[in-house]
Image (cartoon, rainbow, N blue to C red):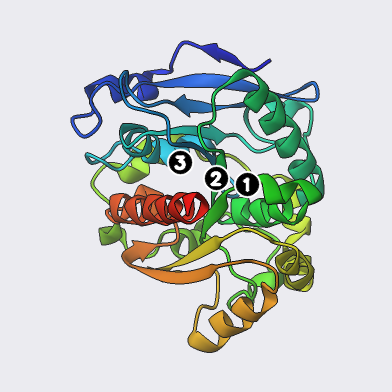
Amino acid sequence: MSTETAAPALAAEAATDPTAPGVRVRDIVLDADGVPLSGLLATPPPGVPLRATVVAVHGGGMRAGYFDARTHPGQSLLTLAAGLGFAVVAVDRPGYGLSAGRFPSGATLAEQSGLLHAALARYARHHDTGAGVFLLAHSYGGKLALHALADDRGAAFLGADISGTGHHYVPGIEQMTVLHSRRTWRLHWGRLDLYPPGAFLAVKSLVTPMPVREVAEVRSWGDAFPALAARVRVPVRFTFAEHEGWWRHDEETIASMRTAFTAAPQVVFDRQSGAGHNISLGWAARSYHLRALAFFEGCLAARAA
């Protein structure tokens, strides 16, 4: 069974978030067939009906706290979504957090997908998920989301919102052997003024080395994408930051991505102005999160109709 523990210092501030009164963020440990996956859980305040559950999946070299930034009011996905009636589970992907010891070199995307499905199935047996489960994923987590959606169990998701993930890298990136260094800083962040004061200091505790097995899969992503996309059978939305540095997102590239989703009932592409790759850590975080939640609301409305 998943277990919950006392909230860390950062998460404890949720109770005083003026944009989400009554919302509390706490630690959670998910059981993925015996593998512990650490993360954060936020639930709607008392009296607010649970609409659905959002499972948030972080990118490479980050932790679940990416979705709980607090350097300006309303920035946290967890407190914002919970205040609007969604439960949010932000999970440390296999190879990060508590599971790092089990996977010192990381896990492949296929392995991570199996563990994520196992963890969520057990979570759903012991927690109310409302109308069901959405995926919200960033960067490398977007690759995991597509693997999870392409799995035979993926049709059980209500939909997915993916930011910072495409199918064609900016030229030269596939040849990189080190993806997190001073050389790649601007690819991750973009301009300094896209982020509120204190953002870079606050994120230091979330940054962690990217496992070598993840780095090894970077070059094969373009080849893997078409087959995965063709197996997605739920609505999916992609967002590219205005100052995205990793991925091509010109109109021709987006058209190519769109045609790969032959079975999805809806595929939406959007751009987030005033944002760098790490959208949820910048000034644009609240705008992006609200757009993602609006997409989920649309999915719920279509399902009800």
Measured along the vertical axis of the image, is residue 291 above or below residue 72? Answer: below
Q: Is residue 93 left or right of residue 4?
A: right
Pointer 1: what residue? 157
Pointer 2: what residue? 134
Q: Secondary structure at mark 2?
A: strand
At which x and y percent is residue 127?
57, 21
Q: Amino acid at mark 2?
A: Phe
Q: Secondary structure at mark 1?
A: loop
At which x and y percent is residue 230?
74, 69
At which x and y percent is residue 168?
64, 76
The quadrant of the image that shows the N terminus is top right
Residue placed furthest toward the left: 18
| Disc 2/disc 1 C-alpha distance (Å) | 6 Å
Which mark is in front, 2 or 3?
A: 2
Q: Is residue 236 visible?
A: yes
Q: Secondary structure at mark 3?
A: helix
Pointer 3: what residue? 66
Q: Is residue 37 visible?
A: no
Q: Earlier in the sequence, mark 2 or mark 3?
A: 3
